[in-house]
Image (tube, helix red, strand yellow):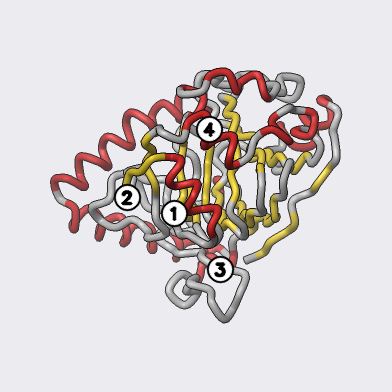
């Protein structure tokens, strides 16, 4: 892989953000944006346990999906407070994905400010919380609605690997899905890495970015960016989503949500093994073409 560090800036003027990052679709980390919010100091494990601890949430393990796995299906359910108690004790390979905590505690929307000086089109009904124990993994994928994301880390550190959407075939994208066939766990450590470059050789040609997010860091992920995340420490983050400004980008996101996903779900229920095999053949053929081009 050809990786560059994501630039980190303490602050940025809106014009520079638009010209240097938003329009060129380039990621950047703004380190001081969230430090202006009450949430920066207020949000912690005990606070969340107090306000939404009795809410039942879906939790996800580190196992990659197979031929039968519908997208975004939880592996188990538990009370949010019980989950937080597990996370605080030490490494746990479970995470919470797309939890709309604001639905249960609407008052906490006052703890941050929508950064509308940087971009427009925020989907204000759906700010989302992501929580993970140390060692939990979010496998390589891109967000299905193709929104721009401002992802702010609270508590702990998280390693993030990023690739532009255009690198999808080098990453062995599963057709009709937002996931990669490859497992990028511990990609940075040759002794523990699960990334098999003999099986997935085109990944070596992929160009991307990597960064470690710390408390208060806000990562701008342009629409369609592939991302793989590993929790170095137990922690949580909030994602603010903004629709693309172009009609084409919005329509492609709608197709992914209501067309592509429904087709994939139907085929997994009807012909799971055949569907999985056919997608794998197509993905490997596309990757082979990328290798021949390079």
Query: Mark 4 to mark 2: distance in Å?
Result: 25 Å
Mark 3 or mark 1, earlier in chain: 1
Give percent across and percent down for residue 123.
Answer: 54, 21
Gap in Å between the C-alphas at discs 1 and 4?
21 Å
Residue at image point 74% right, 33% down: 34
Q: Quadrant of residue 150?
A: top right
The residue lying at 41 percent from left, 26 percent from top is: 254
Q: Secondary structure at mark 1?
A: loop
Other residues around mark 1 within 10 Å, as few (<14) / some (14–19) / many (≥20): many
Residue 75 tag number: 2
Q: Which mark is residue 50?
A: 4
Please tell me the numbered disc located at residue 94: 1
N-terminal-most mark, 2 or 3? 2
Identity of the residue furthest to the left in this view? 270
Residue, disc 3 = 186
Which is more N-terminal, label 2 or label 1?
2
Label pair 2/3, CB-CB below 8 angstroms: no
* Residue 106 point in image, percent of width and height: 53, 19
């Amino acid at each position: 892989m050809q990786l560059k560090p994501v630039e980190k800036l303490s602050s940025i003027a809106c014009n520079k953000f638009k010209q240097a990052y938003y329009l060129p679709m380039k990621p950047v980390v703004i380190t001081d944006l969230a430090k202006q919010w009450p949430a920066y100091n207020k949000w912690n494990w005990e606070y969340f346990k107090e306000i939404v601890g009795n809410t039942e949430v879906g939790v996800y393990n580190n196992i990659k999906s197979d031929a039968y796995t519908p997208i975004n299906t939880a592996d188990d359910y538990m009370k949010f407070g019980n989950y937080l108690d597990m996370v605080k004790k030490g490494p746990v390979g479970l995470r919470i994905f797309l939890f709309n905590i604001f639905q249960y505690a609407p008052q906490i929307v006052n703890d941050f400010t929508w950064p509308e000086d940087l971009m427009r089109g925020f989907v204000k009904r759906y700010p989302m919380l992501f929580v993970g124990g140390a060692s939990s993994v979010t496998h390589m994928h891109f967000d299905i609605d193709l929104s721009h994301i401002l992802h702010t880390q609270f508590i702990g550190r998280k390693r993030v690997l990023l690739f532009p959407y255009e690198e999808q075939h080098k990453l062995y994208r599963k057709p009709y899905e937002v996931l990669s066939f490859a497992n990028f766990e511990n990609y940075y450590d040759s002794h523990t890495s699960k990334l098999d470059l003999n099986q997935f050789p085109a990944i070596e040609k992929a160009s991307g970015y990597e960064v470690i997010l710390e408390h208060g860091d806000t990562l701008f992920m342009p629409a369609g960016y592939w991302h793989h995340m590993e929790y170095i420490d137990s922690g949580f983050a909030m994602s603010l989503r903004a629709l693309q400004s172009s009609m084409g980008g919005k329509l492609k996101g709608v197709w992914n949500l209501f067309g592509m996903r429904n087709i994939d779900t139907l085929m997994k229920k009807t012909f799971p093994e055949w569907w999985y095999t056919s997608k794998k053949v197509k993905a490997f053929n596309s990757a082979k073409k990328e290798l021949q081009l390079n």
